[in-house]
Amino acid sequence: MKLHQESSGALNTVTGYGADYVEINLVRHTGSLLVLPQAPVIPWPVSSFEQLSPELFAMLVDYAPEVVIFGSGERIRFPHPRLIAALTAKRIGVETMDFKAACRTYNILMAEGRKVAAALLIEA
């Protein structure tokens, strides 16, 4: 699906997505990513839900988002609380949704000026 890019300055915006890719600012990525509005796009070294670990979610702690939108793939799968413990210990919320909904929700929250991060799982 292509999304129309609005004027968002230098903010990272999801401009398109499909089953095996996401476009950030019109650049296609085929692997899992961490996306924040004002930080470089970060490759997220995970290619399946079963590979998720506490360390992978902890990569977001230093960015101090208010909320992390976790796109769990084609269907909604909730991470075990131990996986997101580093985030919840810092009072960072985690919302889980399927990959497509996560892309759309990230854009909405980012456009509202929220301190949001997206953890987008693209399964190989």
Image (cartoon, grey):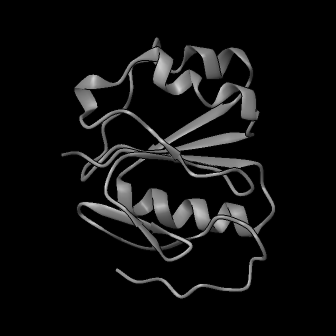
Question: Which quadrant of the figure contains the N terminus?
Answer: bottom left
Residue placed most toward the observer, 106 or 76: 106
Q: Single out the residue that lies furthest toward the left.
A: 124
Position of 56 compared to 123: left or right? right
Quadrant of the rendered image containing residue 90: top right
Question: So how many labels did they put on this image?
Answer: 0
Residue 38 versus residue 95 in the image, above or below: below
Q: Position of residue 33 (x, y in %)?
A: 46, 47
Residue 30 versus residue 8 in the image, above or below: above
Quadrant of the rendered image containing residue 76: top left
Q: Residue at 77% across / 66% down in the picture?
A: 112
Q: Residue at 59% across / 84% down in the picture?
A: 5
Position of 23 compared to 9: left or right? left
Residue 124 versus residue 51 in the image, above or below: below
Residue placed most toward the observer, 73 or 77: 73
Q: Position of residue 4 (x, y in %)?
A: 53, 88
Q: Position of residue 64 (x, y in %)?
A: 76, 33
Q: Position of residue 111 (x, y in %)?
A: 73, 70
Q: Residue at 76% across / 70% down in the picture?
A: 10
